[in-house]
Image (cartoon, rainbow, N blue to C red):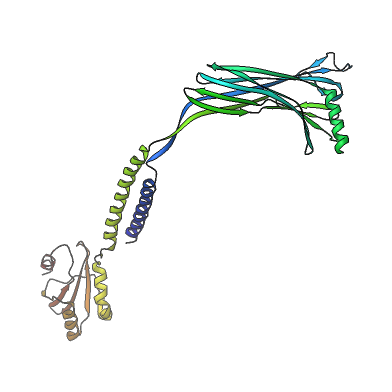
Amino acid sequence: MRAAAVALIILVLAAVASLYALASVAAMPAQQPVSTPYYSYSGTTNFNYLASLRPNILYNQTTLGPGEGILFTNLVASINLSYDFVATFTAASNITLIAGFAVTLAAPSAWNYSLNSSAFVVPQRSMALDDSVSVSTFVNMSTVSRIVATIASETGVVPVQFYLNFTGPLILNVNSGGHASSYTFSPILSFVIGSSEMTPGPLSSTFAQSVTHDGTVTNTGRNQDLIISGILSAGFVVAAGVAGYYAARPRPRSTRAQVKEFTEPYRDAIAVTSTPPKRAELVVLADWLDLVHVADMLGKPILHWEWTKSHPTRHLFYVLDYYTQYVYLVPAEGRPDEEILSELR
């Protein structure tokens, strides 16, 4: 009984879970969004600088580029700033490129000053794979020092360090196969200028852009999941129903339980014996109470014998009165009563 109940609970839970899964799949949209790529492009900006040095005894050269030595602030007379921008396309594209630069000075959380800027339009052209453009400008560090000193005297803010920012704003207008795209890219090379050194930041910056078309397609997986979930749900529901039927169906009581029930009130008058009734005159009684009445009249005990050779075990009660035996055979499935009684006659 306990095993059947456990199995029923498991099946019910499985049925509920499968129905929930079916409802979840049914709630999925019949159409699902999809992005179709048209083309993509990317760009890389590589910065460079070349610092011209004042006469000094530290370096045996008049200029310093990236990786060639420390830029000491007092030694740098001027600096040439440049960048190369390379664009790469996955499809033949017509582009218009607006390229330029801006040089600014900035003190952290204090002020910003535009030192120089310029922009120009690269004529529209067709790019099959990649193309590039170069931009450069010149900065006089004596001019920078005078500007910073003037701002400090006017504002009273004397920065411990400030920034020299070289920005390369780029605007790409791209058209490929009738699909247009616009992208603004603002790479920057920043120098941290302190009392002793000028420290450049990263010299490279990249971007990537993809042009897609957003649409919808039929969610084919949803239909397959609906069929699978429906089959599983139906199977679990049917199995749970069958298990519930068998779990709720009354179970036949065992013969031993029946015997205990009707003999309990007379247990003091019953004696268990391992000796079967002897072959003698048998008086077969059809009712248990008839045997109880006979035992009461004769003042004899009721003997209880279990015939274990029979399957299932048969229970026989009898009262012995000299050569007469009053017998009550408890009804049970298996061999007919007459066959069993015939072996005792």
Residue 55, picture quadrant: top right
Q: Position of residue 2 (x, y in %)?
A: 34, 61
Q: Nearer the viewer, residue 138 or 286?
A: 138
Residue at the (15%, 77%) spot, across then down = 287
Depicted 7 relative to depicted 316: above or below: above
Residue at the (69%, 19%) spot, across then down = 135
Residue 208, picture quadrant: top right
Task: Please give left or right for residue 207 compared with residue 318 in the image.
Answer: right
Task: Please give left or right for residue 2 compared with residue 33 in the image.
Answer: left
Residue at the (47%, 28%) spot, across then down = 37
Residue at the (63%, 25%) spot, across then down = 170
Depicted 240 relative to depicted 141: above or below: below
Task: Please give left or right for residue 165 compared with residue 267 in the image.
Answer: right
Depicted 235 relative to depicted 82: above or below: below
The answer to whether residue 157 of the structure is visible from this angle is no
Q: Position of residue 259 (x, y in %)?
A: 24, 72
Q: Nearer the viewer, residue 230 or 46?
A: 46
The answer to whether residue 154 of the structure is visible from this angle is yes
Q: Nearer the viewer, residue 298 or 294?
A: 294
Residue 285, picture quadrant: bottom left
Quadrant of image for the C terminus: bottom left
Number of labels in the image equals 0
Quadrant of image for the N terminus: bottom left
Task: Please give left or right for residue 80 compared with residue 57 in the image.
Answer: left
Q: Position of residue 122 (x, y in %)?
A: 62, 18
Depicted 203 relative to depicted 259: above or below: above
